Amino acid sequence: DTGVSQNPRHKITKRGQNVTFRCDPISEHNRLYWYRQTLGQGPEFLTYFQNEAQLEKSRLLSDRFSAERPKGSFSTLEIQRTEQGDSAMYLCASSPRGQPVEKLFFGSGTQLSVL
Amino acid sequence: AQSVAQPEDQVNVAEGNPLTVKCTYSVSGNPYLFWYVQYPNRGLQFLLKYITGDNLVKGSYGFEAEFNKSQTSFHLKKPSALVSDSALYFCAVRDMLTGKLIFGQGTELSVKP
């Protein structure tokens, strides 16, 4: 097991384009989280999955953002009609089944730059 | 609403000196508190957590944290700083319903030789 994997590591796109990021959590981790981090700030919660069910979405997640976890394994985060304000590091994290006080394991993130 | 605050944007320490990175929290009920470290262009790495029990929690890389209920604080400490400890440090509180972490704004630690 190699930890939480995120692809791509870097994404440069032009304003108005759509982008999709992928997260592969640690095997058998049923909880999956997406966060956004801008320079000099702490990670901000975006959304949370338990298995394939999306159970919470932050108000930060505008209607241009959509996340899926179709089979309860990997997850994708799509941003439509990107804006310069979407430029940030997008982090994915997972945690084990049935242990609500267990730590979250983070991936290395996808750095998005919108030109 | 649960939250944590890190009052210092930056902490500067000389190598070999003790270091403290401050964190205060605001929660209803019992807090579940965490410290994470982030090196440049990397994800967050877990350092330690407080759930219950001893107020002094020991973690990775020689770090420890002291939980103080009366002061609602959870300061990160290390007796002797290393240059390699230079990084961003984040305090967080865990939402017990969803398990999500709510992070502070971070403190940049700089350890000079």
Image (cartoon, helix red, strand yellow):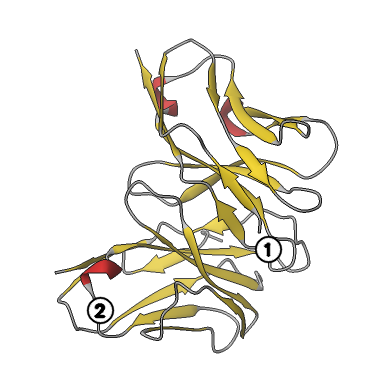
Which element carries disc 2, helix, strand or loop? loop
Image coords of residue B79 (percent x, y): 59, 15
Q: Quadrant of the N terminus of chain A?
A: bottom right
Judging from the image, mark 1 belongs to the subunit labelled B
Q: Quadrant of the C terminus of chain A?
A: bottom left
Q: Is residue A14 above or below residue B76?
A: below
Left or right: residue A18 compared with residue B97: left
Left or right: residue B90 compared with residue A98: left
Judging from the image, mark 2 belongs to the subunit labelled A
Residue at x 55% of width, y 42% of height: B5
In terms of depth relative to the viewer, which is nearer, A57 or A20? A57
Checking the image for residue A82, the label placed there is 2
Residue at x 59% of width, y 46% of height: B4
Amino acid residing under circle 2: Thr
The lab-note entry on whether marks 2 and 1 share a chain reads no
Tally of numbered discs: 2
Amino acid residing under circle 1: Gly
In the displayed orientation, state which residue is furthest to the bottom. A70
Image coords of residue A70 (percent x, y): 54, 89
Where, by quadrant of the figure, is residue A10 drawn?
bottom left
Left or right: residue B91 compared with residue B11: right
Image coords of residue A30 (percent x, y): 66, 73
Where, by quadrant of the figure, is residue B52 drawn?
top right
In terms of depth relative to the viewer, which is nearer, B29 or B112? B29
Q: Is residue A106 above or below residue A86?
A: above
Residue at x 45% of width, y 65% of height: A5
Image coords of residue B85 (percent x, y): 45, 27
Left or right: residue A105 compared with residue B64: left
